[in-house]
Amino acid sequence: MTAFADTLRSLIALEGPITVERYMGLCLAHYYGTRDPLGQRGDFTTAPEISQMFGELIGLWMLEVWHGMGRPERIRLVELGPGRGTLMADLLRAARLMPDFLAATSVHLVETSPVLRERQKAALAQSGTAVTWHDSFDDVPGGPLLVVANEFFDALPVRQFLATDRGWCERLVGLDGESLTFGLKPDPERGLGNPIRRGDVLEWPAVAQSLVRSLAQWMARESGAALIIDYGYWGPAFRDTLQAIKGHSYADPLTEPGEADLTTHVDFHRLAETALRENGRVYGMATQGDFLEALGITARASSLRQRATPAQADAIDKALARLTERGAKGMGELFKVLALSHSGLETVPGLALHPLSPART
Ligand code: SAH
């Protein structure tokens, strides 16, 4: 048992069972705050860690959106949960093609983990761009904005409700002796609608929704666009998607609290709906494979291959296949992409305008 697990159990013993949202929040703060979880020797690998092409193409996306915005003289480039800083470093390198864009740019990283902030500092030391760190998106100063979040929303805590014979109950984490265990609390006051089938699970991403609301309101007030990429679906799914990953394998979410990555799959429909309600324009959702292909990943791979050794060319081919692979297990299909923008933007690269978006103003 770790000291964190002890603290968590004492907290539950004292206060009673806690919501899944609070459990995820506490565990993830400890998990990210105490380690770099990325890469082969860590717990999971993300798209920017697989290939430089990912960050480069997002850089070109940002450049094009900046053009669409009328090339504002100052733009804040914000990344939510930048991990090792790899995506931002690749993005800024690709943006060198356009010195005007780089001159207009300041970088703002929203990151709570001190360990990962250090990694980001090292990755961006040579970028030649001013970088500022923030604990929360709400701390980013005003002005036009371009935001990217890769594998960030899946780390935001959700509440879970289960349809039972007694109606919707909230899933809680409590104690059974020394062990953590799931329990249920009847919660009839919540306006969740009537359960359709017993056993359905409703995931309530209040934290993610509040962030999307802030993003959309910011864009309505100033201007800008945000690109969200994550493991997810167009919901509702009515199932439990909470999972723990440790050392690249599935783990039990309660066995080693704070020592495994905890995620849920992102319901992009709910995020889109939240942005539309704030009068944001919404683009997508598309699969990561379709999105990267629309941005030209195949051509980018060919041009990298021309200057590569045979071993490097092989690695480029493998990365291309991994990022775009279709099918039930392929990153190209499991990962989805959604963008939002202020109402003055006509379009964004690689994604179709959602039909319920407000007209351009
Ligand atoms: N985007 C990176 C890392 C994904 S891991 C990549 O694609 O490689 C999730 C990242 O979000 C980590 O940097 C983690 O420290 C950060 N993070 C998780 N929860 C956070 C929160 N509530 N606020 C700010 N950053 C958070």
Image: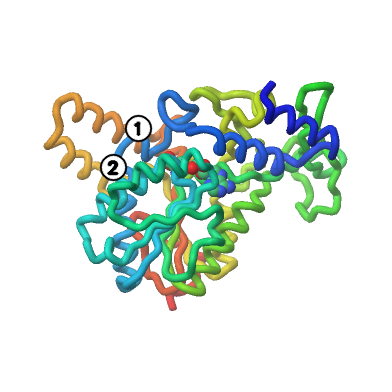
Say the numbered circle drawn on residue 53.
2
- As helix, strand or loop, the secondary structure at mark 2 comes to helix
From the viewer's side, name the closer residue of 280 and 23: 23
Q: Specify whether tag 1 is near ligand 1 (CB below 8 Å).
A: no
Task: Locate residue 274 relative to residue 324 in the image: left or right.
Answer: right
User: Which SS class for mark 1?
Assistant: helix
Left or right: where 267 falls relative to 46: right
| Number of other residues with Cα within 10 Å of mark 2, as a class: few under 14, some 14 to 19, many 20 or more | many
> Compared to 341, does 42 lie above or below?
above
Is label 1 or label 2 in front? Answer: 2
Foreground pick, 341 / 114: 114
Question: x%, y% of residue 215?
Answer: 52, 62
Check disc 2 and give the amino acid type: Met
Where residue 352 appears, x then y in whole percent? 40, 58
Task: Locate residue 107, reporting x and y percent.
Answer: 39, 57
**Is residue 115 visible in this depiction of the protein?**
yes
Disc 2 C-beta below 8 A from ligand 1: no
Q: Image quadrant of residue 98?
A: bottom left
The residue singled out by tag 1 in the image is 322
Q: Residue at x 45, y 65 (%)?
A: 341
Within 10 Å of disc 1 (Cα), the crowding (few <14, some 14-19, many 20+) is some
Q: Amino acid at mark 1?
A: Arg
Residue 301, numbered label = none
Dividing the image into 4 quarters, which one contains the N terminus?
Answer: top right
Residue drawn 28% across the image and 61% down it: 102
Measure the C-alpha gap from mark 1 to mark 2: 12 Å
- The answer to which quarter of the image holds residue 203 is top right
- Considering depth in this image, is 304 or 287 the residue closer to the camera? 304
Left or right of 16 on screen, residue 257: left
Check the image and report above or below for 152 versus 270. Answer: above
Q: Front-most of 6 and 337?
A: 6
